[in-house]
DNA sequence: GTGCTCAATTATGTATACAATTAAAACACT
DNA sequence: AGTGTTTTAATTGTATACATAATTGAGCAC
């Protein structure tokens, strides 16, 4: 009944707990690599079978994914991979365009040699994934690059926001990506590393901003959500009969 | 085994599910009103008794609170009210100083008469709570004011971030607040509403920025965390013997 | 009296059983 | 055949039981 009043000594590592949940980790990675599409149903029993855990663990994972906006949870109806609306997509990129240029600036000011080396290594891994035509892995690594910069900026709070936005971007790209101007990333990321290495804050900020605008403008919200596509197609077929 | 592939029609209301959890709602409000202090232990059985639910529900609520940085979850050690470090406190306010001025600007551009009326009503409620010396309620309402502005700005994604930061601020204030310059809020909030009503974006942005800097600079990280205070006090008593 | 060890207790981690709800199938009826 | 209704199956919501780990406190040695 009474809530005991004892104070603990040291704090956190925010999502350390949820990172041990195989459902959270597995589904997150699958979404980031676009191995499961937006809107896909995620039944608790199936997930339990796949990851060899009980529904208790599945539910914990799904709840965490839901708070990360990667999964939609509807009462009594279960979970499905999130299906961000055009509006949400726009908002996510607006938020990134607000946060990440500042983050790149701070990274340029803070970066140590070790950070640069780490980024270069990462860019190499991105390059390899693209060569292998492993588009899923490439996409995930590309997102991770942005997170790494946010971490170098040494502001964990904002870095977490950026991490969340980057994750959601994978779903947005899955839904609204059009052009095959994919190769932008390669050059952009390298140029960004160069600017950061030079501690050229202004340049890093500008490069990040334009990089994000590039991605954003390669999205197309013109057509209705892809989720309605099938219905529309079917209607079209029906009418043509 | 196989995950069925069916698409659902409409999406989200992100934390609609967790808002139905009495533990989440109850503890969140208690923290925002500073009725439970940082570091306080939150045993699952106790919470279950208080809210009349099983540990299943308690755990779901605690997990959500943990992702909101209001509760710290340590494996096999249970939950306690979060105890933000000075660094985390600084980061939270830095993030607010980055996001909220922009938010106030957008609010000034977007605000409709109904929004203004709502804000004025809210300011009145804040005033009343202060008169009644209901400092907990006053603090929660004061935070809610900032959230409302973020919502008027019509950017849900960023508004959610701000909401999270505002919540965490309650814990930070509980730990690091010094002066009784509390009355700042009253004037600041009214001036802000005026600027927004005039659609004076620059003024709204400036007012919000300086308002946040005021709060931030009224925090003192000089002394060790208050969690050590009791220990220090006890040591002091011991020494005086 | 102080510090250590180990049992007893308490609390958390996970699975499972059952209830409630939703989705699907079978059936009756027009 | 097509539509509306009832029955059945499948899925989620919640509580509880059991396993496991942490904490407390008693007893003992020093």
Image: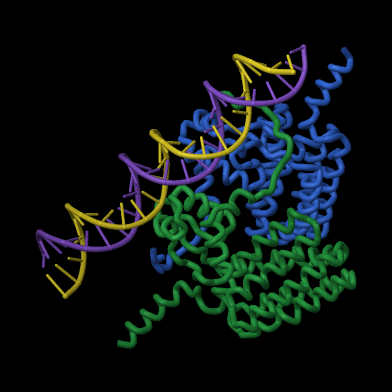
Chain colours: A green, B blue, C purple, D yellow
**How many numbered discs, if any?**
0
User: Residue B198: x and y, percent?
Assistant: 76, 56
Left or right: where A154 falls relative to B166: right
Q: Residue at x 73, y 31 (%)?
A: B130
The answer to which image quadrant residue D13 occupies is: top left
| Residue B157 visible at all | yes
Q: Which quarter of the rendering shows the C terminus of chain A?
A: bottom left
Nearest the viewer among B131 and A203 is A203
- Residue farthest to the bottom, as pictured: A240
User: Residue A22: x and y, percent?
Assistant: 53, 56
Q: Residue at x 64, y 84 (%)?
A: A131
Q: Residue at x 85, y 71 (%)?
A: A196
Nearest the viewer among B150 and B119 is B150
| Residue B147 visible at all | no
User: Residue B8: x and y, percent?
Assistant: 43, 65
The answer to which image quadrant residue B223 occupies is: top right
Q: Which quarter of the rendering shows the N terminus of chain A?
A: top right
Q: Is residue D26 above or below residue A122?
A: above
Q: Is residue A149 above or below residue A56?
A: below
The answer to which image quadrant residue D9 occupies is: bottom left
Q: Is residue A164 above or below residue B120?
A: below
Q: Is residue C21 above or below residue B32?
A: below
User: Residue C1: x and y, percent?
Assistant: 77, 12
Left or right: where B117 falls relative to B89: left
Q: Residue at x 84, y 32 (%)?
A: B180
């Amino acid at each position: 009944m009474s809530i005991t009043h004892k104070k603990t000594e040291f704090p956190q590592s925010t999502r350390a707990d949820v990172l041990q949940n195989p459902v959270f980790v597995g589904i997150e990675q699958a979404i980031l690599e676009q191995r499961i599409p937006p809107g896909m149903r995620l039944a608790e029993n199936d997930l339990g079978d796949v990851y060899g855990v009980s529904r208790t663990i599945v539910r914990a994972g799904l709840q965490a994914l839901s708070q990360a906006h990667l999964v939609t949870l509807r009462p009594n109806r279960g979970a499905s991979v999130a299906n961000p609306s055009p509006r949400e997509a726009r908002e996510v990129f607006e938020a990134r365009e607000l946060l990440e240029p500042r983050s790149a600036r701070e990274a340029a000011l803070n970066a140590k040699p070790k950070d640069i080396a780490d980024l270069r290594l990462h860019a190499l891994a991105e390059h390899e994934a693209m060569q292998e035509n492993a588009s899923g892995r490439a996409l995930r690594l590309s997102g991770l690059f942005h997170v790494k910069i946010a971490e170098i900026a040494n502001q964990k709070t904002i870095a977490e926001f950026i991490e969340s936005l980057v994750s959601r971007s994978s779903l947005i790209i899955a839904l609204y990506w059009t052009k095959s101007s994919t190769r932008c990333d390669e050059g952009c990321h390298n140029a960004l590393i160069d600017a950061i290495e030079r501690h050229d804050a202004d340049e890093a900020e500008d490069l990040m901003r334009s990089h994000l605008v590039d991605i954003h403008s390669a999205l197309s919200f013109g057509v209705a959500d892809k989720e309605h596509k099938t219905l529309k197609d079917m209607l079209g077929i029906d009418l043509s009969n």
